[in-house]
Amino acid sequence: MTVLRTSLRNFVAHKGRMLLSGVAVVLSVAFVCGTLVFTDTMNTTFDRLFSQTAADVTVSAKDAESDGQPTTGRPATVPGSLLDELEGVEGVSSVSGGAYSTSVTVVNADNENMGSSTGAPTIASNWTEIDEKSMEVTEGRLPRGAGEVMVDADTADRHGLELGEELRTISALGDFRAEIVGVAAFRSTNPGATVVYFDTGTVQQRLLGDPDAYTDVYVMAAGDVSDEELKERVVAALGSGEYKVRTQEEYAAEGKDEIGSFLDVIKYALLGFAGIALLVGVFLIVNTFSMLVAQRTREIGLMRAIGSSRRQVNRSVLVEAVLLGVLGSVVGVAAGVGLAVGLMELMGLVGMNLSTDDLTLRWITPVVGVVLGVVVTVLAAYLPARRAGRVSPMAALRDDGLPAAGSRVGRVRSGVGLALTLAGAGALVAAAGSDDAAGGSLFLAVGVVLTLVGFVLVGPLLAGGVVRVLGAVVLRVFGPVGRMAERNALRNPRRTGATGAALMIGLALVASLSVVGASLVASAGDELDRSVGADFIMMSSAGQPVVPEAVERVRGTEGVEHVTEYRWLEARLTGPDGESVEESVTAASATYAEDLRVETVAGELPAAYERDSMSVPEDFAKAHGVEVGDRVEVDFAAGGTAELTVRAITAADTSVDQGAMYLSTATAERYVPEDRMPLNMMLFAKAEEGQEDAAYAALKKELEPFPQYEVRNQADYKELLEDQVGQLLNMVYGLLALAIVVAVLGVVNTLALSVVERTREIGLMRAIGLSRRQLRRMIRLESVVIALFGALLGLGLGLGWGVAAQRLLALEGLKVLQVPWPTIAGVFVGAAVVGLVAALVPAFRAGRMNVLNAIATE
């Protein structure tokens, strides 16, 4: 109890000093718990949505297309006769037919795309009893004829749609117009899809191309018949293998599986950034407890003198750490819930609606948060606690600080740090020179970890030299005040090293990702210049296929020399070795050989577009013993089987269409029926000589009625790629900002505790003539040099990581190394600003000290 009371008293006495460390714990735990709550809420939202939109048993076509597969623009269907057939099955209470398509684009009177900007689909459907479970008509009525449509409330609100307005629906079968006669709201949460409803006949005729077909048949159970029992009876009535039959639970599970990988990517990415922030927080906590223990040396010595054992002193410090961890974690859990709500609101701004009604807080989330916060805090405080336990009773009689760690300990630490750094550098060099991506990735990971740990350990050794250089460049111009700031930063190299290391981690990641991102853009631009011969690329940013009417418009554009069609087909390939593999093959116009200049290791690529010919990539040829002239059996998933002759083997040394297998559209059409031929995923066009600008403008004009497609020349494409990479990096930088905020708190904490530690010294300097302004400047300059020290370490480390990563990624086509020096310089200047901001409060407090009271402080 004595230890506990002492710990409580010390904790309360130093609550101000604990606050910033507590904030680090709060932020780290909040990010972890917020991520868990956010992803659990998304799971709950989709689970509820899939459950509400599923019948007891759903019957679909066995070959129904799913996300990522080539699309014909016409959904796979089942005959309408199934409804009568299933109505007679025992245990069935009702049967209804669902007809829908996701291969549509809906535009308003101003030709604006009503689709979601988040990648969520646009769904055009008929109204069934299943929709009555998930939707509620809030305005107007259901559509009754070919010229009427109903929209979901979220889409209506997002685009300001009102009853009486006209919408145009574009599909592979043509486009048609309809007047809005109703608005329906989701009973649960709409994650962002655009949903429009037509009467059944319109969907069948206009979108399915068959007036007696449905995409799904919904079967509802009667009485106490279970879904599994009903499924067995339906399968018995229809026969196994012809149709896909799913219970409500299976339907929901399948839908959840389709988005599961997307949710996992979000979850683990956010947890990764939370881990970085937690690691940075460790440095802050270690610094805090080390300085607090150093400042209480006499107090601890007195405790030892009156009988406290080393174990009790050690335990006292650890109890303070537990208190800090518990309080910070509890607040962090609550803040995490708030963060999750904030993320949900942010997703709402970009079109993915998540309701707080679905907010999910599982019991495991606060447990993980509290345990994580406490364990990390205690581990961070362990070494300072051990040092506190080594304080001797004689320390009560003198004020010379903690027992020196000893030059031997410092030499061992520096030696280990240098060894790890050199080993890590060797691993990075090995990764950069690797010929194997898998082995090189392992070397890269090892190199990153070893160099990071090595720099942390060798930080105090580096602090002496780096701070002196920074002092000569930055501080000496401020005269005696600058020299005092330099000496203060050098006074405790271990503390300066730990504080700089906290900032180093975040900035190292920023620098390395900047190098990789800039290299990606530069490499892609270089590859486009070398490989792409087409002047224009036309495609949908949302991945929608190109409808036939748009293809015809492009073909008829004035000033265009040729148009290349490009589509994917799923197939099973059997090589000369007898092994079969599932692959996607690219069917394109023969002019694609001009539009994409792909190197070959054998044969000539134009020959691959001849009748019953194809090309295979180098890796496939090596794996299956394929040579030019060999025949490969190609079993098209949407058609028949062909024996195609390999006319070319393409080089693996490319990043555009890497690994693609080419054949001509004419060859594909011989074996795939017209109604099962996938639509083009993109179009390429070459302008007539000297007509590039005119053709560009003409193509844009021709595709104006189809706002889902973009016409881009090579400059546009490069700009698009740069924007996409920039947006991704900005998002990553935003998440890394959490770690940098924690690092800034570390600088603030270090300065604040350092000011307290030097109270008497500050009083004496003020007494001999140092002004308040000079004092504040000294502390600000000390902060700046510590921040710049961390920035130099981080940027140097990050550049090493980035260069090694780029050389490894060169195996995948990232051949151009581009160091974004403006970004690096901006980060370095930003670090100086961070140092200035971090010093504001400590400098202000130091300037307000009473000189006599400060001198009298012991």
Image (cartoon, rainbow, N blue to C red):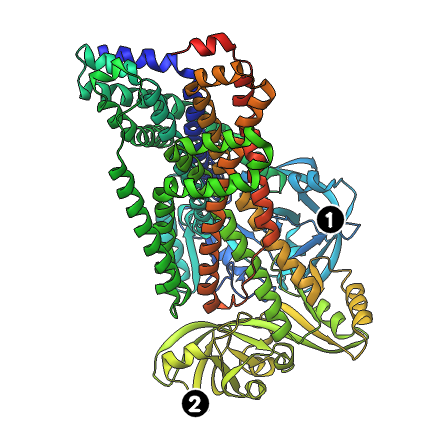
- Percent across and percent down for residue 708 are 69, 58
Q: Amino acid at mark 2?
A: Asp
Q: Residue furthest bottom?
A: 629
Residue in the picture at 65% in, 62% down? 718
Q: Earlier in the sequence, mark 2 or mark 1?
A: 1
Is residue 818 something that shows in the picture? yes
In the displayed structure, would residue 199 be above or below residue 553? above
Between 557 and 712, which is closer to the camera in this rendering? 712
The structure residue drawn at horizontal position 34% and vertical position 29%, both measured from the top left corner, is: 377
Farthest residue in the front direction?
768
> Looking at the picture, which amino acid does disc 1 mark?
Glu
Residue denoted by label 2:
630
Judge left or right: residue 491 versus residue 417. right
Q: Quadrant of residue 704?
A: bottom right
Query: Height in image: 383 above or below 422?
Result: above
Secondary structure at numbered mark 2:
loop
- Mark 1 crowdedness (10 Å alpha carbons): few <14, some 14-19, many ≥20: many
Q: Given this view, does label 2 or label 1 mark the residue nearer the observer?
A: 2
Is 298 located above or below residue 118 in the figure? Answer: above
- Nearest to the observer: residue 749 or residue 603: 749
Q: Is residue 852 left or right of residue 282?
A: right
Q: How far across and how far down the image is residue 20, in percent?
A: 45, 24
Q: Which mark is residue 148?
A: 1
Q: Nearer the viewer, residue 423 or 816?
A: 423
What is the secondary structure assignment of the residue under circle 1? strand
Q: Tell me if mark 2 has few (under 14), some (14-19) or many (20+) residues whose alpha carbon lies within 10 angstroms of its own.
A: some
Q: Position of residue 804 (x, y in %)?
A: 44, 60
